[in-house]
Image: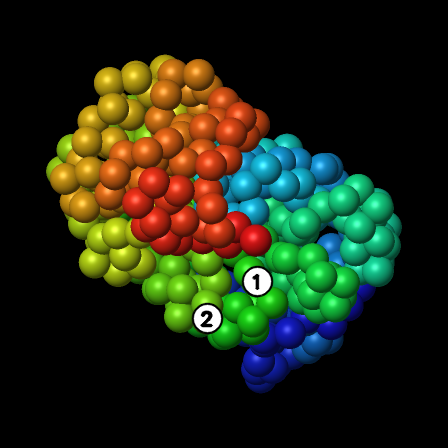
Amino acid sequence: MKEAFLYDRLEGLRVRCNLCSHYCVIDDGRQGRCGVRENREGTLFSLVYGRPIARSIDPIEKKPLFHFLPGSLSYSLATVGCNLTCLHCQNAEISQMPTDLGRIAGGRAEPREIVREALDHGCASISYTYTEPTVFAEYVCDIGKLAHQSGIKNVLVTNGFMSPQAVARLGPLIDAANVDLKAFSESFYKDICGARLKPVLESILGLKEQGVFVELTTLLIPGANDSEEELAELAAWIASGPGVDTPWHVSRFHPTYRLIDRGPTPAASLDAAFKIGRRAGLKYIYLGNVPGRGGEDTLCPSCKAGLISRRGFTVLENNLKAGACPECGLAVPGVFG
């Protein structure tokens, strides 16, 4: 175990965790909502430090990040635990393990071992992903510092329900983030995820202010977050907040975990979201979970030249020249070195 950061000691051996926007007040001997941060006699501990449950070598496009070191490999890891309870979680067996099963599982790997393995596999980055990295933030920070010393970038794949204190703590170590902007209604976040929308929006803007390169993902769930009115509000917020250059991934839903009362997202809904994003002025919109159907390529928003062609998580061709369109010279937002 490792003592957690970002918490306050309260009266009666209670503590308040300040890591995410739940701000859990935790009694002695109990855990926060994530199930992986425990109060022991007035000291808050991380139960998952150095205990990865999943490690893999992924293409960076799987995060998904399309404007960050395209075609490179990313060492991906996660511990168990999550601060949300999304009914449609595709990794529920590990994200919800502490709360669904009351178990903390995982191997043992110190930060230096993670960085060494990333170097050995030729990875340009380390991605904190699969579950919610906020809940293992101490581990992220210690790995991230060593990664930067070794010339490796850090990537956060997050639900964004972190506190401003966590954004400030993690921001200097994170080079890129994909944030799930799951919907644009408080009711969706409350009923489907057990969270709130506003802190997610604030985290997205906070990460941008910290200099983190941000891409956004929205999983379209039929009858839940796919109305044209809601998508128009969401796209308008992206345009006015993070900016029209922010890549937006619109992905197809498949029934899973506890949300199995509806079918996969119709292709027409993805197409409608694409058009809505275009009307809002968004320049880089991608369709996910429909490989080979189109909507995966990066086109120059000025002259429409093909810049990066993809199929699924594979880059087929990259025509960028020093991060710019080879035809008209327009600079493309991202990290392409």
Query: For the image shown, how many numbered marks are present on the structure?
Result: 2
Instruction: Say how the picture is coloured.
Output: rainbow
Residue depicted at 66% across the width and 36% down the height: 58
Residue depicted at 26% across the width and 60% down the height: 241
Vertical relation: 207 (above or below) 232: below
Residue depicted at 20% across the width and 38% down the height: 278
What's the residue type where badge 1 is placed? Ile
x, y percent for residue 82: 57, 49
Vertical relation: 1 (above or below) 248: below
Residue 183 shows in the view: no
**Which tag, 1 or 2, sits closer to the chain's start?**
1
Q: Given the current orientation, which residue lies at the most extreme front position?
A: 327
Mark 1–mark 2 Cα distance, whole angstroms, equals 9 Å
Which is nearer the eye, 319 or 284?
A: 319
x, y percent for residue 299: 34, 35
Is 139 on the left-hand or right-hand side of 50?
A: left
Which is nearer the eye, 107 or 173?
A: 173
Q: Look at mark 2 in the image and give the residue it sits on.
A: 210
x, y percent for residue 275: 19, 31
Determine the secondary structure under disc 1.
loop
